[in-house]
Image (cartoon, helix red, strand yellow):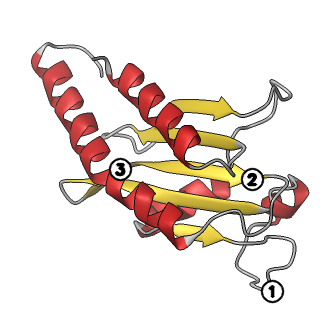
Amino acid sequence: LDIREILEKVLDSIFDLLVRIERGSIILLDPESGDYTEVISRLKEVADPQEVPYCREIVDRVVREGKALIVSDSHGDEKNDLPETLRLSNIRSVLCMPLIGRSKVLGAIYVDSVTRPFGFRDEDLSLLKSVTGPLAMAIGNARTASRRQGRRP
């Protein structure tokens, strides 16, 4: 399968399993530049096509730190280290996991809810953790195969 097809299938499965999410994205990094190169997104409901399907500040932080981040209620959270974008975009709860393969961050899985505070549970975090390892391996393998064939993944 093409890596984009794999990402779409994984995102569809995440939506099937985590019924409380309203938006989800899988974001990949370019291995050389570190820029975001591939974003696969899905929305539970039709939304404004201009709307960014994820909070960039949250993804940047997860990619930089290489560890998961859960925001239970951005409107009620007293932490000052949350980006103001969450409140301005009306995002209530967020779960974001890094995709780590061969000790390198390859991207992130991001899901959120704009209507539900406390939208994620510990088992949701466990589920995404179980997905990220094999997915990161598939991404790495696809990139290796593409390089061998002389094309971009």
Q: Give the spatial CA distance, label 2 vs label 1.
A: 19 Å
Q: CB atoms at circles 1 and 3 under 8 Å apart?
A: no
Viewer-nearest of labels 2 and 1? 2
Q: Which residue is mark 1?
A: 78
Element type at mark 3? helix
Mark 2 residue crowding within 10 angstroms, few (<14) / some (14–19) / many (20+)? many
Q: CB atoms at circles 3 and 2 under 8 Å apart?
A: no
The answer to whether residue 56 is above or below residue 58 is above
| Side of 31 relative to 38 (left or right) | left
Element type at mark 2? strand
- Residue shown at 40%/22% (left/top)? 4
Q: Which residue is mark 3?
A: 131
Q: Amino acid at mark 3?
A: Val
Q: CB atoms at circles 2 and 1 under 8 Å apart?
A: no
Q: Which mark is residue 58?
A: none
- Residue shown at 85%/54% (left/top)? 115
Q: Split into 4 quadrants, where in the image is the N terminus?
A: top left
Q: Give the spatial CA distance, label 3 vs label 2.
A: 20 Å
Mark 1 residue crowding within 10 angstroms, few (<14) / some (14–19) / many (20+)? few
- Residue shown at 38%/60% (left/top)? 129
Q: Which mark is residue 113?
A: 2
**Total numbered labels:** 3
Question: Which picture quadrant has residue 28?
Answer: top left
